Image (cartoon, rainbow, N blue to C red):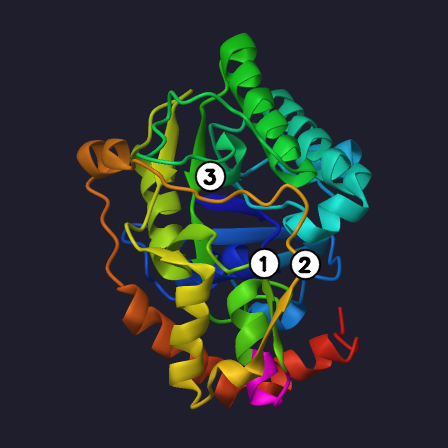
Amino acid sequence: MRLMVTGAAGFIGSHYVRTLLDGGYPGYEHADVTVVDKLTYAGNRANLPLGDPRLTFVQGDVCDLDLLLDLLPGHDAVVHFAAESHVDRSLRSAAAFVRTNAGGTQTLLDACVARGVQRVVHVSTDEVYGAIGEGSWTEESPLLPNSPYAASKAASDLVARAVWRTHGLDVSVTRCCNNYGPYQHPEKLIPRFVTGLLQGSRLPLYGDGRNVREWLHVDDHCRAVHLVLTRGRAGEIYNVGGGEERTNRQVTQSLLGLLGADWSSVEQVADRKGHDLRYSLDDSKIRDELGYAPRITFEEGLAITVAWYRDHPDWWKPVLEGAWTR
């Protein structure tokens, strides 16, 4: 078995690859992995066990059709994590998001069709649904994205569906809630606030902090992705939730408690443009069909995550200093 994993020098993809190479997914203990990553600001070679003989690392762009056509022969499946993923950055420069998320997905899937790859999982986000005041989205809910990032991911999901329907490619889509855990770039809320508190900085909380997100530890997310890879149905979408809804204010309070700080460390700043108030996923489909369930509670996972950042300043300080070696 040989897998290609795109974007796996980043936060979620690297966790998937490390777990797979560590024997964390039964039946894949001897699988070989090819990682393709462009190594943008969010990609870090140090996230991967590059010395593992089962791992091949290729620095490359998922928009590079010739590269993909050259690499894909011999691979049984592709797990597609590669994406531009930070909403704030998409507000400033949407073009890169459309290029990578929509165009890159199209290029990758076209290459998979051309080279006869048997199975693809496209990893997406709950943000494609927009916002929801009450209840939870199902996989049949309409796509109503409210940021350039979310719109580009919604486009990539539709591309995946079109390639399945037109060419018969065995592709499934996962849509996950907010992730957190070790190795997450400190532009995202939890690592940004943890590293800020560790340095004695004030925390920039958007608006009144009432925005609600559902949180899932990265390990649970990656288990769900692997379940979909091995047992998911072609052409299907699987929501991946955590059942752990928190306001940004509640998350901030938990972090302050874990790091022995108080609200004097928090500074309320102008809200993000088009900031969705609440996300919530109905993930009964993946639970009922594939037997998925999260294992790590938010309290447990957050404590583990804070401890990891406290113990690994050598990993995150170069990021904040702009000296991340790629």
**Span colored in magenta:** 195-201
Residue where numbered disc 1 is placed: 207
Magenta stretch contains residue 108: no
Residue 155 vs residue 261: left or right? right
* Helix, strand or loop under label 3: helix
Q: Residue at x 59, y 72 (%)?
A: 192
Q: Does the residue at mark 1 contact the one at mark 3 (Cβ under 8 Å)?
A: no
Q: Earlier in the sequence, mark 2 or mark 3?
A: 3
Q: Amino acid at mark 3?
A: Asp
Q: Residues within 10 Å of mark 3 (few under 14, many from 20)?
A: many
Amino acid type at image mark 2: Ala
Asked which secondary structure carries label 1, the reply is loop
**How many neighbours does mark 1 have within 10 angstroms: few (below 14), some (14-19), or many (20 or more)?**
some
The reply to whether residue 29 is in sight is no
* Tag 2–tag 1 contact (CB < 8 Å): yes
Q: Where does label 2 land, which residue?
A: 270
Q: Amino acid at mark 1?
A: Gly
The residue pinned by badge 3 equals 126
Measuring from the top left, give residue 97's x and y in whole percent: 73, 40
Q: Position of residue 41 (x, y in %)?
A: 74, 62
Front position in the image: 132 or 92: 132
Q: Would residue 164 be visible to someone looking at this image? A: yes
Distance of label 1 from label 3 (alpha carbons): 22 Å
Q: Quadrant of the N terminus?
A: top left
